[in-house]
Image (tube, helix red, strand yellow):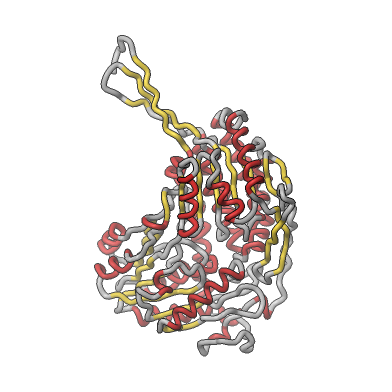
Amino acid sequence: MAARTLSYLLSRSRSLSSSSGAASLLPSLGGKSGGWRNSNSHRYSTAAEVEELITPQVSINYTQHLINGKFVDAASGKTFPAYDPRTGDVIAHVAEGDAEDVNRAVAAARKAFDEGPWPRMTAYERSRILLRFADLVEKHNDEIAALETWNNGKPYEQAAKAEVPMLVRLFRYYAGWADKIHGLTVPADGNYHVQTLHEPIGVAGQIIPWNFPLIMFAWKVGPALACGNTIVLKTAEQTPLTALVVAKLLHEAGLPPGVLNIVSGYGPTVGAPLASHMDVDKLAFTGSTDTGKVVLGLAAKSNLKPVTLELGGKSPFIVCEDADVDKAVELAHFALFFNQGQCCCAGSRTFVHERVYDEFLEKSKKRALRRVVGDPFKKGVEQGPQIDTEQFEKILRYIKSGIESNATLECGGDRLGSKGFYVQPTVFSNVQDDMLIAQDEIFGPVQTIFKFKEIDEVIRRANSTRYGLAAGVFTQNLATANTLMRALRAGTVWINCFDVFDAAIPFGGYKMSGIGREKGIYSLLNYLQVKAVVTPLKNPAWL
């Protein structure tokens, strides 16, 4: 199950941190990267500079749009580059979509919904197609994971042992729901038979981000297909490759043409036309809060299509005074640094009770210094490069802001190597709530550690943010856990765990972290219309 796959990652992280030989995995850079800010910085390594990179054993076969069951070039003939974040080198040229491509894809999806077999076949048959697809993905696990790592930079072990299996689990979960979606019979005042029908909403436009391309594909496509909808999907321009591969497998499993269409390209030229399209019935978006506002506005100004948004976060991770400090350090480290810190629900504000603060801080610094950074294809590497130049430079600007705001830089604070987008695991202490690094979503390997004294105080500070996506609580006291889980204004609260993403657990945010929920039964509601049907009864035997 999905939750178990992430538990694997956490247990692996713990085993690395407790190994006396962990530091030996980190050869010295000899001071080549410059700008070192702590005496232990030589313990970091970067594959881009000191190692020969592993060549991925996978080919790139699909770079065109997928429209009406066929791979086709962009209407304009244009392409854009896809990169290897380890080096910044181009690894493929992908069809660059625009409004004309969106129109073609929407027309195919509309015809498939209005005239095609997908919403008209039995739910059981839809379920069988989704199950066959999951089996095919499982069969091709390793090559899909390799392509994900090559285009995204995340550790191959993470992709192969957690994320591809999670996609499989999610599609099997939604396959199980396909033939269990039904309405109700409703008692009414008077001689009437009243029933509700749960109908597919129609053509769904979906826009997914670059940090978890395969998992976001599953979160969006799985429930939409289970409910009988058709789809036009925009992939992130940074990571367009794996969605095309798994979409090909979905068609091999028996998905009819036009049911799933994929248009690659940029936000203004593909995302905006999709969000404002008058023939799209539903929109789902995962990404930044600022872009989410734009998407919501475009949907409202066009045909007022309903929108699901999963947006940014600045999640608190609260370490209480009764915590086992060693376990808390490891879990807080995982909560922030997982996926290079490129996680919307990352525990990016670490609040530590004053009684254990000093011990926690020292051990967190040591754990960050032991973090293995390098070629994500190499076994044992915990952290690969950031996704691209833009994100890489943004993280370094936030680190500079923290230093200039007089937060204490405990370790890290600079790039690693001279090639690729590697950033040192960075820890700040003495962080104040009004600093930019305390307020903004950095989306990188930067841990900010705060001190608190009272539970009421930390509740107030944890909730003093425009976000409300997730929170973590580390305590052995049940009363404390109960108090915090109810007081924290967040869509998910993890108690003594973090990043548990089972297929059945809903995910979404309060406040400016989004609208609606993904995964679980709640995600189905995003892709269904409820119709009430009322029929008069003549001389009913009962009411």
Residue that lies at the very extreme toward the front in this rendered image: 301
What residue occupies the far top of the structure in this picture?
539
- Residue 402 vs residue 447, the one in the foreground: 402
* Residue 406 versus residue 112 in the image, above or below: below
Residue 59: percent from left, percent from top: 75, 57
Judge by depth and name the residue closer to the eye, 38 or 70: 70
Residue at x 52%, y 90% (from the top left corner): 39
Q: Nearer the viewer, residue 509 or 237?
A: 237
Position of residue 95 measured from the top left corner of the image (x, y, whole percent):
70, 53
- For the point 39% across and 71% down, the residue is 350
Figure check: 425 above or below 215: below
Count of labels shown? Answer: 0
Q: Is residue 184 left or right of residue 255?
A: left
The quadrant in which residue 347 appears is bottom left
Residue at 57% across, 51% down: 271
In the picture, the quarter occupied by the C terminus is: top left
Image position, residue 342 (x, y; %):
52, 65
Residue 172 in view here? no
Residue 54 seen by the camera: yes
Question: Residue, x 31% and y 60% (percent of image)?
Answer: 488
Q: Position of residue 143 (x, y in %)?
A: 69, 56
